[in-house]
């Protein structure tokens, strides 16, 4: 894929007897909002560390923005990263910290200060510009680390667990900030255990398990949003046969424990999920059922549990 922002090809990395990456092959399209999903030990942080140049792979290759491997000279200012446990200078003041990293990108002193003030405002820490890093709460530290990754106009932004420790308001504000970056055409790669958050943000995802990618692609494809519908029923009749008669060419299943009718269908021109939902809902309502909710496809959590 020539337009990949980040490409891993059979990447392997071992720490003693532990194989963190066991042949990771993965392509992240340019301009995508890409989520890395996997349990602890799946290799997400190791993959991030190799992409950022913190670690070297034992075998395999990596390509970043068309460059073979991480070359600071060629990629300076083009990649922004926020590691999961970023070590920030405890005695440094927040504004000074960001100015220092902006200067490392080659910015002038004046531009570095403008960029530092901008990202402090974007991550909600303007009032902490003069505070020492050691005085920040865990959530504030996470926001400062994310701000560091957003200095300048990086083409590729790598965020490892960016919302860890943030309260709901901060999570919402960060999500909107990242959506704005995505709208600018930049590539954002996020790893998180918050699958609901990733489902709202990401147009592409990959499931990692034991150091390899077991599935990757557009979120809608992996969750089946274009070929599966779930209709939750309230108490009362569950006329599943009425749905089967209304949709004779589709596969209709009944989940008694969840009181959910699941319809698997083949999308065709003029017959997408909306048409299937309409036909099924009419059949259910005509037969006296009470519809409690409708969902296209499965959640990322459901898909993750099925695959792992």
Image: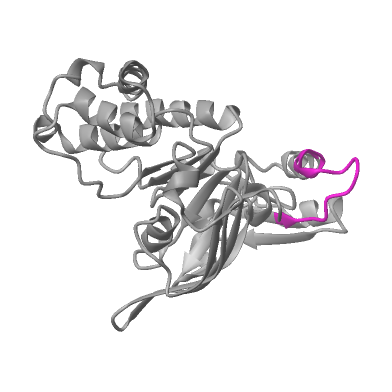
In the image, 297 versus 56, the foreground residue is 56
24, above or below 170, in the image: below
- Residue located 90% across and 40% down the image: 270
Q: Which residues are magenta?
A: 263-278
27, above or below 34, in the image: below
Q: Is residue 240 left or right of residue 13?
A: right
Q: Residue 92 location, x and y as percent?
A: 13, 31
Whether residue 238 is visible: yes
Q: Residue 55 location, x and y as percent?
A: 36, 62
Count of marks placed on residues: 0
114, above or below 307, in the image: above
Q: Is residue 270 magenta?
A: yes
Q: Is residue 57 magenta?
A: no
Q: Residue 160 location, x and y as percent?
A: 37, 48
- Residue located 78% across and 52% down the image: 243
Q: Which of the 4 quarters of the picture holds residue 216?
A: bottom right
- Residue located 11% across and 28% down the image: 132
- Residue located 25% across and 17% down the image: 126
Whether residue 168 is visible: no
Query: Quadrant where the N terminus lies?
Result: bottom right
In the image, 192 versus 98, the foreground residue is 98
Q: Please, which residue is most extreme toward the right here?
A: 269
Q: Is residue 224 left or right of residue 249?
A: left
Q: Residue 7 location, x and y as percent?
A: 58, 58
């Amino acid at each position: 894929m020539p337009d990949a922002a980040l490409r891993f090809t059979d990447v392997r990395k071992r720490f003693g007897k532990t194989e963190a990456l066991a042949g990771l092959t993965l392509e992240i399209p340019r301009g995508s909002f890409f989520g890395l999903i996997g349990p602890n030990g799946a290799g997400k942080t190791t993959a991030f560390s190799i992409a950022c140049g913190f670690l070297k792979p034992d075998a395999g290759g990596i390509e970043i923005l068309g460059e073979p491997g991480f070359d600071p000279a060629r990629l300076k200012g083009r990649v922004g990263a926020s590691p999961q446990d970023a070590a920030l200078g405890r005695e440094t003041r927040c504004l000074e910290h960001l100015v220092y990293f902006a200067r490392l990108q080659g910015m002038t002193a004046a531009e570095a200060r403008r960029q530092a003030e901008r990202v402090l405002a974007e991550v909600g820490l303007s009032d902490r510009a003069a505070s020492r890093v050691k005085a920040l709460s865990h959530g504030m530290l996470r926001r400062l680390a994310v701000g560091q990754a957003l200095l300048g106009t990086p083409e590729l932004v790598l965020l490892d667990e960016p919302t860890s420790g943030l309260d709901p308001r901060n999570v919402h504000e960060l999500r909107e900030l990242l959506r704005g970056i995505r709208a600018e055409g930049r590539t954002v790669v996020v790893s998180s255990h918050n699958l609901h958050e990733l489902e709202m943000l990401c147009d592409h995802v990959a499931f990692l398990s034991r150091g390899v990618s077991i599935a990757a692609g557009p979120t809608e494809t992996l969750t089946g949003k274009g070929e599966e519908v779930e209709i939750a029923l309230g108490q009362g009749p569950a006329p599943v046969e009425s749905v089967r008669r209304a949709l004779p060419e589709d596969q209709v299943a009944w989940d008694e424990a969840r009181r959910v009718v699941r319809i698997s269908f083949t999308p065709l021109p003029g017959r997408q999920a909306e048409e299937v939902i309409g036909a099924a809902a009419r059949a259910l309502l005509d037969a006296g059922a009470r519809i409690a909710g409708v969902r296209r496809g499965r959640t990322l959590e459901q898909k993750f549990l099925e695959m792992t």
